[in-house]
Image (cartoon, rainbow, N blue to C red):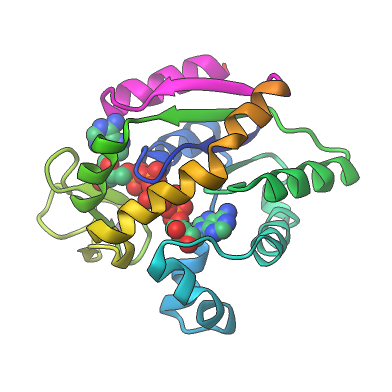
């Protein structure tokens, strides 16, 4: 299955991706995770994108699209993929559509997770992530079983640099100005499935999986 996870920062895309990819046995591709890994490893790409992530601005479309296609063209994506954080602009969505068409592939569904902006700020400021595998937690709603350690790999759980309140607000503005239009774009293609992201994490996962089956 070829899927996109859409939603504002903090809607729970990464959290739901963990459950969906395992249940459907497909590859999870998060552009945010790819960028953060490159920043951590101080690669050329990392140096190029660092400033954008720190400010909560979008990385330029051309660069982001190229990175996504490099990943999608790998063998393990043949049986399906779950895109998380891409596309994020109309240009990216159009480039994805064109690339799929060139390869005679079709997108199955766009999973849109909706959450109110006030809730988003609370979620992101309380979020902690695994520095190794990127798994996402929340100090109140979804803490790791052992304090400060990832449930999946046992490594340290830390706060993301762009989860400071000012940057969070900018990321929400960027979503409203550049990404929100994609709901309409995919609605017109008849591909959208909407979910209330304020429900409990497991309940949302169940609803998503039921809707896809
Ligand atoms: P990215 O990493 O994609 O960040 P984001 O979209 O801002 O999304 P988040 O990871 O913040 O939120 P999420 O929806 O995954 O929520 P999560 O599951 O963690 O992008 C980062 C940056 O990279 C961008 O700002 C940009 O600079 C760049 N970038 C990335 N993609 C790009 C692109 N395509 N083009 C250009 N630039 C790009 O959950 C959040 C918190 O809430 C967690 O603590 C979680 O435990 C908790 N939570 C989740 N679900 C629930 C629930 N149901 N109830 C209660 N708590 C919950
Ligand atoms: Zn981990």
Q: Is residue 143 magenta?
A: no
Residue 123 is drawn in which quadrant?
top left
109, 62: nearer the viewer: 62
Left or right of residue 43, residue 143 in this image: left
> Residue 100 at x, y = what percent?
81, 43
Residue 113 is drawn in which quadrant?
top left
16, 172: nearer the viewer: 172
User: Can residue 91 be seen here?
Assistant: yes
> Residue 117 at x, y = what percent?
31, 37
State the residue at coordinates (73%, 24%): 189
| Above or below, 84 relative to 180 | below
Q: Is residue 209 magenta?
A: yes
> Residue 12 at x, y = what percent?
36, 38
> Residue 157 at x, y = what percent?
22, 61
36, 59: nearer the viewer: 59
The boundaries of the magenta stretch are 189-212
State the residue at coordinates (61%, 36%): 182
Number of marks in picture: 0
State the residue at coordinates (42%, 48%): 173
Quarter of the picture holding the C terminus: top right
Quarter of the picture holding the N terminus: top right
User: Can residue 27 be seen here?
Assistant: no
Left or right of residue 142, residue 180 in this image: right
Left or right of residue 100, residue 196 in this image: left
């Amino acid at each position: 299955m070829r899927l996109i996870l859409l939603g504002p920062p903090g809607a729970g895309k990464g959290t739901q991706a963990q459950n969906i990819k395992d249940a459907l046995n497909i590859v999870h591709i998060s552009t945010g995770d790819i960028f953060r890994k490159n920043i951590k490893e101080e690669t050329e790409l990392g140096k190029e994108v660092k400033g954008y992530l720190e400010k909560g601005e979008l990385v330029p479309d051309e660069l982001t699209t190229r990175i996504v296609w490099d990943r999608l063209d790998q063998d393990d994506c043949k049986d399906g993929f779950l895109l998380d954080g891409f596309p994020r602009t109309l240009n990216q969505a159009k480039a994805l559509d064109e690339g799929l068409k060139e390869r005679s592939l079709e997108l199955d569904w766009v999973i849109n997770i909706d959450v109110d902006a006030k809730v988003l700020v609370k979620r992101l400021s309380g979020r902690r992530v695994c520095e190794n595998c990127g798994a996402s937690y929340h100090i109140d709603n979804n803490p790791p079983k052992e304090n400060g350690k990832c449930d999946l790999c046992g490594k340290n759980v830390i706060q993301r640099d762009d989860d400071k309140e000012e940057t969070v607000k900018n990321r929400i503005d960027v979503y409203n100005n550049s990404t929100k239009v994609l709901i309409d774009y995919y609605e017109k293609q008849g591909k959208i499935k909407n979910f209330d992201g304020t429900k409990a994490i497991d309940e949302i996962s169940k609803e998503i999986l039921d809707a896809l089956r």
